[in-house]
Image (cartoon, grey):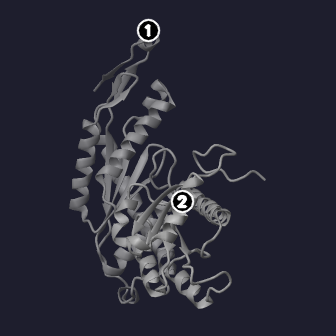
Amino acid sequence: MEPYQAPGEALGSKPIFRVAIVSDAPAESLHNAQQIHKTLTTAGHQVSIITGASDSAMLESSPPEVLILDVSEDIAAAQELCQQLKAQPQSEDSLVVASLPPVYKAGQFPAQTWEALRHAGADDFLPANAAAAEVEARLSLLTQLARLKRDLAATREQLSRSLQYDELTQLLNRRFFFRAAHREWARARRYNHPMTCLMMDIDYFRLYNSTFGFACGDYVLRTVASILRQWTRESDIVGRFGEEKFVVIIPETDLQGAVLLHEKLQKVIRETEFTWQQQILPVSVSIGESERHNLAAPEHLANDHPDAPGDDEDVESLSVREEVAELLADADAALSVAKKGARIPAFSIDATPHLLGRTEMAVSD
């Protein structure tokens, strides 16, 4: 089995830890903290001493992997200090190791005292006057476990995102778009709130692929998706619906508001300079909109709390799926009308000059 290797760490090298020793003792009583500092710096680790949670701003530039809490005989004060440190953003993910005072000799550490410190956020403890080898061994084990846990969490987050989002555009894929849309529709129906939908299609998209190749088409898709993310709200549900088709569910917005967003998106996309291989591409979109009809919600839904049992069944009910499908179909029908009458004139591309290093795109009526 290969040893765990942290990012940026040479294989076979001794891991370097970022450690902060935190003490609530006065400066003249930092003997234990100074001894640990000497042990760890001699071993090559990055170590600092901080006196009290009030000085924790020092942690912001480089959050420590390990916080060693220099515990005094006042366990209640140590508990409070530990809780304060774990509550701060710059150290909430740090491991906390309680370094016990000399009054607790080996094997004489009360279980209830350790339980109190653990409840306050401590992950492990160091016996009083622990040998350098024991200090380093404990830190090595804890830190490498923490790094593995952090990497696993990052991998899990990346996997979760890859399941929900379209890889090219980083917008919701169809499956998770529908899941979010069903949930939002059920909420809008429950409280009889407005909700609208935009269906968008990139005009003449296949010409970009057929003339300049699929890489150009991907560039256009990514850029349009980026504009959608920039000009929609966090509460809006934005997804990729087809090859060159996008969809936006707009909660708490009537048809007039949807038309305003429709016009803004068309204007921004039209005014954005799409450049591919030193060629400016004329990119426009057609958009259709639809609106949820403000029908009174069924009485049993209107009276329910949004987190009441049965909501999941309501979100996935046949009526919700059918109503969302109807909203999308109405927007798609409006899009078809828009594509017939409101698009910019089709552009034609003379690909012959491309063989000579020039490509010309001309707009024709």
Residue 122 placed where, x, y %?
54, 76
Which residue position holds label 1?
356
Using the image, determine if residue 59 lies above or below residue 129: above
Give the percent coordinates (x, y) of residue 22: 45, 69
Mark 2 vs 1, N-terminal side:
2
The residue labelled by disc 2 is 38
Extreme residue in the right direction: 1
Q: Quadrant of the C terminus?
A: top left
Count neighbours of disc 1 (C-alpha within 10 A) and say few if under 14, some if 14 to 19, many if 20 or more.
few
Callout 1, which amino acid?
Leu
Q: Residue at x 46, y 24 (%)?
A: 211
The residue at the point 46 percent across, 86 percent down is 74
Q: What residue is shown at x 23% (from left), y 48% (from top)?
A: 264
Spot occupied by residue 354 in the image (x, y as percentages of width and height): 43, 14
Circle 1 SS class: helix
Residue 197 as seen in the image, left or right of residue 76: left
Locate residue 317 relative to residue 256 in the image: left or right. right
